[in-house]
């Protein structure tokens, strides 16, 4: 079996991961408002610069949600990384996995003329795969320089009032809202992970 199960999320084994993708140190990602285009791991044709906005979410293991979000209307690009910790030490995948402070997160660049922040929150809720661990928490990270915190709080309160649940039973009450700390871009082999490795894992499983 080429996979091990961690907190209910399928992850490839440490040996397989490191065999397929040599370890690389995560690089710092300066906080919002902008992401250098060369750092975006997946993208669509860009809209006008003034229409681009960014949002960051903890959605469980970041591999699948980053791909799923990119398929949504108005989403221009996604990048996976680590955030949720105020420490200045640059994290690595190993330190995130064996620690209790960092969160795997997806940073999204979107065109707010095509998708509103609230609609993006709806996508976040439906596409996330959280577990009880800090690493895979369900978190909306809000930028203090914008009105995201107020809008996210209003969205969450409405969801909880309506007792919103997904088809699989996940309640909106699992969602947390936290101030955004520095976002560190994850190692290169995590970027566009399933797009790159899905076919190879299929061959390995044969």
Image (cartoon, helix red, strand yellow):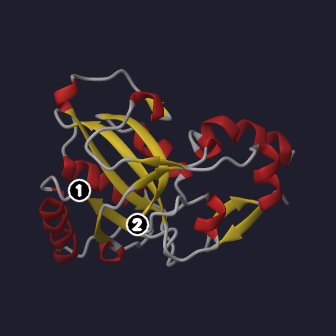
- Mark 2: few, some, or many residues within 10 Å (few <14, many ≥20)? many
Residue 135 or residue 84, whichever sits in front: 84
Q: Residue at x 73, y 36 (%)?
A: 199
Number of numbered discs overlaid on the protein picture: 2
Residue 134 or residue 44, whichever sits in front: 134
Residue pointed to by mark 2: 84
Residue pointed to by mark 1: 143
Q: Quadrant of the N terminus?
A: bottom right
Assign a secondary structure to mark 1.
loop
Residue 21 or residue 89, whichever sits in front: 89
Q: Is residue 130 above or below residue 74?
A: below
Residue 195, percent from left and from top: 61, 36
Q: Residue at x 40, y 28 (%)?
A: 37
Residue 128, percent from left and from top: 44, 59
Assign a secondary structure to mark 2.
loop
Q: Quadrant of the C terminus?
A: top right
CA separation in Å, label 1 and label 2 = 12 Å
Q: Is 88 left, or right, of 113 in this rendering? A: right
Q: Is 183 left, or right, of 19 in this rendering? A: left
Q: Is residue 38 above or below residue 57?
A: above
């Amino acid at each position: 079996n080429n996979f091990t199960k961690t907190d209910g999320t399928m992850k490839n084994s440490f040996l397989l991961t490191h065999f397929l993708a040599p370890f690389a140190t995560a690089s710092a990602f300066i906080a919002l408002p902008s992401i250098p285009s060369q750092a975006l791991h997946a993208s669509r044709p860009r809209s006008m610069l003034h229409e681009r906005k960014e949002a960051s979410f903890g959605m469980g293991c970041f591999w699948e949600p980053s791909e799923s979000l990119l398929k949504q209307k108005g989403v221009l690009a996604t990048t996976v990384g680590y955030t949720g910790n105020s420490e200045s030490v640059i994290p690595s995948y190993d330190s995130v996995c064996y620690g209790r402070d960092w969160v795997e997160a997806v940073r999204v660049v979107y065109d707010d003329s095509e998708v509103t922040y609230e609609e993006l929150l709806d996508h976040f809720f439906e596409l996330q795969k959280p577990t009880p661990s800090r690493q895979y928490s369900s978190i909306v990270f809000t930028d203090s320089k914008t009105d995201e915190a107020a809008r996210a709080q209003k969205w969450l309160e409405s969801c909880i009032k309506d007792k919103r649940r997904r088809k699989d039973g996940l309640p909106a009450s699992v969602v947390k809202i936290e101030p955004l700390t520095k976002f560190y871009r994850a190692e290169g082999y995590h970027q566009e992970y399933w797009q790159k490795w899905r076919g190879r894992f299929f061959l390995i499983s044969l």
